[in-house]
Amino acid sequence: SFILRFPVLPIAMRLAAATAAVVWGGFPAPFSRELSQSVEGGDVCIARAMLRRFAALPDPATPVNGSCPFVAEDEQLVKQFQRGQKQEETGVFDEAVAKGVVACCARDGYRDSGASAGSLGYLYKIHIIAQQNRSIQQTGRLLDKDNKLVMTFTARLHGIRSDGTEQPWPDYGDGDYGLSEFAGLGNSVTGLIEADLNSPEDDPKSFGPYGVNRAVRGLQGNAKVLLPHLRDGILVHTGEWPGWTEDKAMPNSLGCIHVWPAEVKRIEQELLKLGVVERKNPMTGKDYPYKPQGLLSIEEVDPPALVVV
């Protein structure tokens, strides 16, 4: 099984290094309220996952209704966190706890194992290594079932802006890191994910005229917590962006993975050559009617350290 373990560092150190995040009423995204045994919701599921990471426990899967009740076990996890940070042990997931767990435990530490798609029962794998600053575009890889490189492509994994605002389409951003992947329209989710080739979306302007790869179900990392019951509709796709050329950065998405038009077209073509079937697009990963044929593996790493000589 995949168990995440994090060093219990002082949260002040984590906060100093953490990416700036949108804040709603003092709470960092995706949280906006105190959590205790009187509440339930998707934010409880996310809080539970982060608190379990602090306690070096496996990530939980999210119920199909996308909602979790705050139970006695969650209260004990909050107290354990507060004890570790020398805070009053109230058992209430308040603003201080929210800021602390986001700083220490929002990143999943997921790393691709290198296992081939075929060894796991799939026909292909799309592998992308992202940086914390999602305005930095990355090179993705399409691998066949035997881990043979089929092609590389340019990818942008940036959701809406860090401040939580959705700018007019297409939004080419301002170099910000992007909104937390735990928020609804935040950055593309990290982890290991079942994926599948779907027929084109109905809106070629926003999604391009080619087949899309749909993130269906999370298996490891943040994706296990979020997909498909808290985040859905994450696609590898392109768009018809006015005035855009390949020498320019692609625009932000609403949480998907943007790829150059010519490369999305080629990904579709290469997958068909590999024997992948292009499924009729169900427009959602919830209650997905097909067996996913591929994997999407997304890591997030820190940028290389700057060495001053």
Image: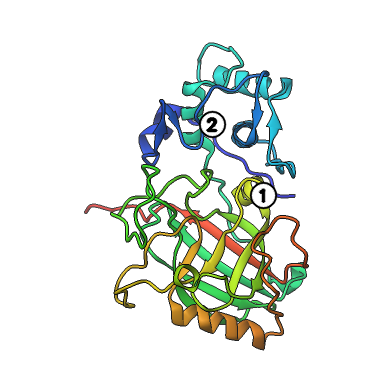
Residue at x-position 40% and y-position 56%: 134
Q: Please provide percent x and percent y for residue 262.
A: 45, 82
Label 2 SS: loop
Does 22 sit left or right of 120 as displayed?
Answer: left
Does 15 sit left or right of 42 as displayed?
Answer: left
Which quadrant of the view contains residue 136? bottom left
Give the Cα separation between the discs numbered 1 and 2: 22 Å
Mark positioned earlier in the residue sequence (1 or 2): 2
Disc nearest the viewer among 1 and 2? 1
Residue at x-position 53% and y-position 46%: 184
Q: Classify mark 1: residues with Cα within 10 Å, few (<14), some (14-19) or many (20+).
A: many
Given residues 153 and 254, the one toward you in this image is 254
Q: Please provide percent x and percent y for residue 309.
A: 21, 54
Does 301 sit left or right of 46 as displayed?
Answer: left
Residue at x-position 65% and y-position 73%: 197
- Residue 95's place in the image compared with 200, above or below, is above
What mark, if any, has residue 170 been given in the picture? none
Q: Which residue is mark 2?
A: 8
Q: Which residue is mark 1?
A: 224
Give, as a three-letter code, the residue at label 1.
Lys
> In this view, which residue lies farthest toward the bottom?
273
Given residues 109 and 296, the one toward you in this image is 296
Give, as a three-letter code, the residue at label 2.
Val
Label 1 SS: helix
